Amino acid sequence: MAEGAGGGAAEATANLVEVFSSVQGEGPAVGRSTLFVRFGECDLRCRWCDSPGTWLPAHEARLERGRGSGRFVSEPNPLPLARVVAACEALELASHRFVALTGGEPLLQPEAVLALARALAGRGPRIFLETHGLAEPALSRVLEAVDVISMDWKLTSDVRRRGDPRHGAVAPFHEAHERFLRTAHAGAEVSVKLVVTPRSRDAELEEALSRIARVDPTIPVILQPVTPAGPVRDRPTPERMLELEARFSHTLADVRVVPQTHPIWGAR
């Protein structure tokens, strides 16, 4: 986020990809009306990513012109905060269950997330942060303005950092995820999403399981069979997902297998 000389909220800006209305397509809030504010740029590279266009800051943002219309107008980035709020209001903000701050990775722009969350608070929907679950210092800066957090737990069998080598072993994410989860759990309603692919290894899944349980075994955990995208062509078998659900449920109180639904009915 950039600020003008006065540094006030009215001068705040954000780099966005799009603002649109739909329903949540994955996780514990699946099917609920959601207004999405998608931030530009991500510092991870997931093999199965279905929106690689969000990896870099966006030159323009698409703003839906009517709720669920699929018609957009494009405006240059960065967008003033007041313009983002107006775009949300034009999509009947108050009639949604959630407004999702998503990406890309929204916590790469923590000041923008905080300013927007504060501006949208009390207007109807709960503030829902979707994040890769690694930027704990940034989370600490925005946590007081967020109601719900859906964090990913990334596995290095399919995910690398932007600066990691393209081949060979890379440092795991477990420790950073555990720190993030502890902070999130202390200040908001939180769930963990874990994308499972045919390459997901038992050892890394067990490590995630033990660390989540160490924070709080009642935290909802979503096991999401991958939706094939990019170089990922296959899903894990139903038998594999059922076996993982049973294994996680021995330790955790709320484990759910929930595939992405929005690709089925053609939503963004």
Image (cartoon, rainbow, N blue to C red):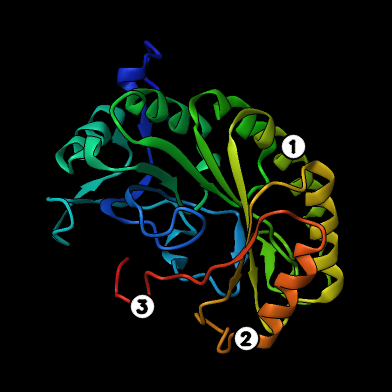
Residue at 71%, 46% in the rendered image: 218
Q: CA distance from mark 3 to mark 1?
A: 34 Å
Task: Decide if residue 96 is in sight here.
Answer: yes
Where disc 3 sits, the SS reads loop
Compared to residue 241, the image places residue 194 above or below, namely: above
User: Residue 244 appears at what percent x and percent y?
Assistant: 74, 74
Q: Which amino acid type corresponds to the residue marked 2 in the rendered image?
A: Pro
Q: Which residue is mark 1?
A: 182
Q: What residue is at 68 percent from the left and 67 percent from the top? A: 159
The earlier-in-sequence mark between 2 and 3 is 2
Distance, label 2 to label 3, CA atoms, is: 18 Å
Q: Which residue is mark 2?
A: 238
Residue farthest to the top? 6
Instruction: Give the side of residue 164 with respect to residue 172, left or right.
Output: left
In x, y percent, where is residue 58?
37, 53
The residue that mark 3 highlights is 264
Quarter assignment of residue 152: bottom right
Of badges 2 and 3, nearer the viewer stands: 2
Q: Position of residue 148 (x, y in %)?
A: 51, 39
